[in-house]
Image: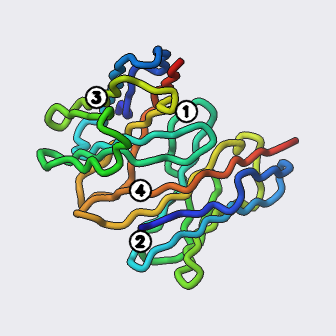
Amino acid sequence: AQSVTQLDSQVPVFEEAPVELRCNYSSSVSVYLFWYVQYPNQGLQLLLKYLSGSTLVKGINGFEAEFNKSQTSFHLRKPSVHISDTAEYFCAVSELSGGYNKLIFGAGTRLAVHP
Amino acid sequence: GAGVSQSPSNKVTEKGKDVELRCDPISGHTALYWYRQRLGQGLEFLIYFQGNSAPDKSGLPSDRFSAERTGESVSTLTIQRTQQEDSAVYLCASSLPRGGSYEQYFGPGTRLTVT
């Protein structure tokens, strides 16, 4: 079965510093990869996705992620964070099963940006 | 256009009571998903509906959980004889059918507290 590991449950960082949120997945077949963000008391919002093509994916709010097949990783990065980036970030993997996108989520990483 | 909506936003119930949670997907989205998010954890897949196909119920944790969907619109998740371990945020998502962008659009969730 597929699984997703987010290596850090919490990441504190100062405003304007760079950040990397790590994500590793286990799969022996082609996958689609996603990062979602959940702001306090809100639903999940898609940040970016990798379906195919270029391994460097750019998303909203200045975030990007790099798909590394050999390391089965899909780490999320931002060169300079803002206070407003404080949120929970979820990495997810899907594999086509029965023709639909069943997402398997990691446990999440809480990003806390301090002034 | 309108996003995915869920009701109620919060529900407090006594142990042993039944509850119904409602999800209104985005118009035109034939795929609908239910997830459970326990405090401090990632999202756990519960059930998937796609058009008139048989739903994938593989994620339902027990026979106390059931879900229905009327055509390609509203879905209700029912939990019978609620237990304290059912306390969680229940998230609904919808997406375009297979062959689409695979992005799932999430509602704000229903926070269920079983006392």
Q: Nearer the viewer, mark 2 or mark 3?
A: 3
Q: Label for residue A31?
A: 2
Alpha carbon of mark 1 to alpha carbon of mark 2: how far? 27 Å
Name the residue carrying label 4: A103
Q: Nearer the viewer, mark 3 or mark 1?
A: 3
Q: Earlier in the sequence, mark 4 or mark 2?
A: 2
Name the residue carrying label 1: A42
Relative height, residue A97 to residue A71 (above, below): above
Amino acid type of the residue tagged 4 in the rendering: Leu
Task: Between residue A95 and residue B37, name the one nearer to us.
Answer: B37
Q: Mark 4 vs mark 2: same chain?
A: yes
Relative height, residue B15 to residue A25 (above, below): above
- Is residue B93 in view? no
Mark 3 Cα-neighbour bin, 10 Å: few <14, some 14–19, many ≥20: many
Say which chain tag 4 marks.
A
Whether label 4 touches label 1, CB < 8 Å: no
Whether label 4 touches label 2, CB < 8 Å: no
Q: Position of residue B107 (x, y in %)?
A: 43, 34
